[in-house]
Amino acid sequence: MSCSTKKDSFISRTSHSVAAKYNVLFNGKIAFEEAKTQLDNSYEDNFWERLPIEPLKIEEEIIPFPGQTIQNDTEAQGFDKAEEKAVKSIQKHSMVIDGFEKNNQIDEAYLLLGKSRYYLQRFIPALEAFTFGIENYPNANLYRETKIWKAKAHVRLQNEKLAIETLISVLRSIELTDEEYEKAHTAMAMAYTQLDSTHLVIDHLKKATSYLTDLNQGPRNLFILGQIYREQEKIDSSNMVFESLSYMKKIPQKYKVHASIERAKNYSEADSTSIIVYTLQDLIKNRDNREYLDELYYQAGLISLKNESLDQARGLFELSVIHNTSKPYQKSLSYESLGDFYFDETSFEMAGAYYDSVLQIPIDQNTKRIRKIIRKRESLNDVIYYENIARKSDSILTLANMSEAEKDIYFKGYIEQLKVKYEAEQLLKEQTTAIAGMGDMAITNNNNADGGTFYFYNPQVVGIGKQQFRNKYGNRAPGDFWLIEQNIGLSSDVVIKETKVELDTSMLFNAAFYKEQIPKSKKVLDSINYVRNDAYYNLGLIYKEQFREYEIAAVDFEKFLGNEPKENLVLPAKYHLYKTYEFFNIEKSNKYREEIVTNYPDSRYAEMILNPKSVLETSNDDNSPEFMYKTAFVCYEEEDFEYSLQTVNDGLERFKGLEIEAKFELLKAYLLYKTVGEELFREKLNTIILNYPNTEESDHAEEALKKLSGLKEEPQQN
């Protein structure tokens, strides 16, 4: 009655088949399914890009050797166990007699072996297992499924043509089941994705989703189909796909929620705003969608922004940030939107703070989007710097120009405000001290604690912490120097001397003290006025040239002209006002035009107004900007870098504000590359991109930066 693998008897075949199916392979399949579930759950989709058809992260930089795995330990152990069970089943229960396999479970063992190796990213051994199973078990029930897996292994090994040939043979089978039909077309779509044949990807995804037997892969295929339609600007088709997905039942929640979000991304004036907003609000109210609140609030904020509901949009973006816990990319988008909001509102300090928050998030800093934010943030440094100078200088000069009576009235109101603030702070300290004296009763009777994970949400933990603090330091009100107010040390062997620090209010509420701080010297006041005017002129240039905020630029140039400006900058400022007012006030633009032409008829600015092309075309004029630029460029080509740089600097000084300024700056960047080095060259290129957007020189600088990392030849100036 012995069950030998060499005996072709009913008992032997049945015994080994049952043992393989219900013992070894059963345990192997359980291990495989558990590892596959963990792999799927740990995979994080980036819904801001087109999803990969198969959710498997390929570690391209690591090529695993036999027995080496690159998944996390839990997943790897599960697939390793499944592989081990498959090998054991083949070794102990295979019955090859007269060249034929008599155990009908061995083909399933080879399929499990190949799938386990596939998810361990050992694609060549996986391909060997699939190929062996296909060649030796052509009549097996899993023959077609094994061929599909073989095709997927070919795709991973970049043998797309072999994969397509294999799948075509599968699809020709008349015995193909609905499940096999869906899997085969899904694998076809994977192959054509690698070949960038988008129209064929669409065709096979449409065929794969005609049955939806797989409630995980099917909705994913539909979602990708909707994304591709949007890429091709077939918005109606994209909307149909996402709407159908959002109403499906028994599919993963992430696809339903993101289908509604993707539909909102397609929002246009032709859509019903109320329906889309209602859909997003309904999803927000659903507690099952708490992990998607950041994305839902963000998308609702974008729609509010498009409808010019600015305050509502800002509130939604802030809610998106608050509810974000584990999605760095989404948080960066929310912060960026808030930064853009305050930037458009010309609240540049707030905008800079939000851009800083974006740059602190651990995401890829080398993308075009992040580089743009970095340049924008750097440009705000100058704005904030000059705005602070202007504001501070204005305040000092305004006070200096007040009469004694006006100063008394001003500081009387100021001191009254200080007193109100001081009294409020003292009251808060007294209340805090009183609450601290109540002990744990002040906090442990809170029945409305929400039980959050942050320790301050746990009243018991807070109570224990406060009691430990009182035991160590005693009761004391919050404030500066709290540690040295009493003779209490940090430990038994560290004692801090008793020091009582009290705020001296005698000067705090003394108007004479403040009036004494106001400068009176004419030399000092003239210096402050000079600094203020320089700030206003630079602010005008920044708002005009970099940010295209023409109305703000005009205000700053007008302030510059109204405060005893430097004589050599009066005419350039008037020319900038002439150009700035062209965008929103033609009457004032014409006023400055006439003033320049009438009062400065021999100036280059008047010539530029009357005959703009002539200024750049007079190449024979030794003093023309075009002639100076050509001279500098010829010297650059002849490697006379010193004279070329001197000419460029002279041109930048004389023709500041003219269109040719960007050309001088670009040539200077290349001169610095030759004379100083690559680091300064990079900085100069970034400055050109920042200061001269939407120009040929800016485009040239961007291209140069892209090529710089691999630059071997000498850069060529255009």
Image (tube, grey):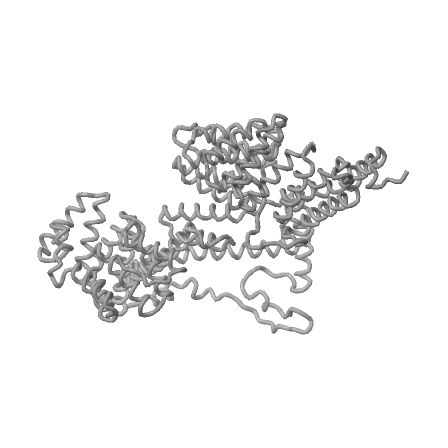
Q: Nearer the viewer, residue 277 or 192?
A: 192
Q: Within the image, what quadrant is residue 12 found in?
A: top right
Left or right: residue 584 compared with residue 242: left
Above/below status of 465 relative to 338: below
Q: Quadrant of the C terminus?
A: bottom left
Residue 674 % position (x, y): 31, 68
Left or right: residue 254 compared with residue 264: right
Labels in figure, total: 0
Residue 174 % position (x, y): 61, 25
Q: Quadrant of the N terminus?
A: top right
Which residue is at the far front?
98
Left or right: residue 318 compared with residue 2: left
Q: Residue at x 62, y 39 (%)?
A: 149
Q: Nearer the viewer, residue 40 or 20?
A: 20
- Does the image show residue 412? no
Q: Within the image, what quadrant is residue 337 found in?
A: top left
Q: Nearer the viewer, residue 624 or 561?
A: 624
Q: Within the image, what quadrant is residue 408 found in?
A: bottom left
Which residue is at the far right?
1
Residue 498 % position (x, y): 60, 72
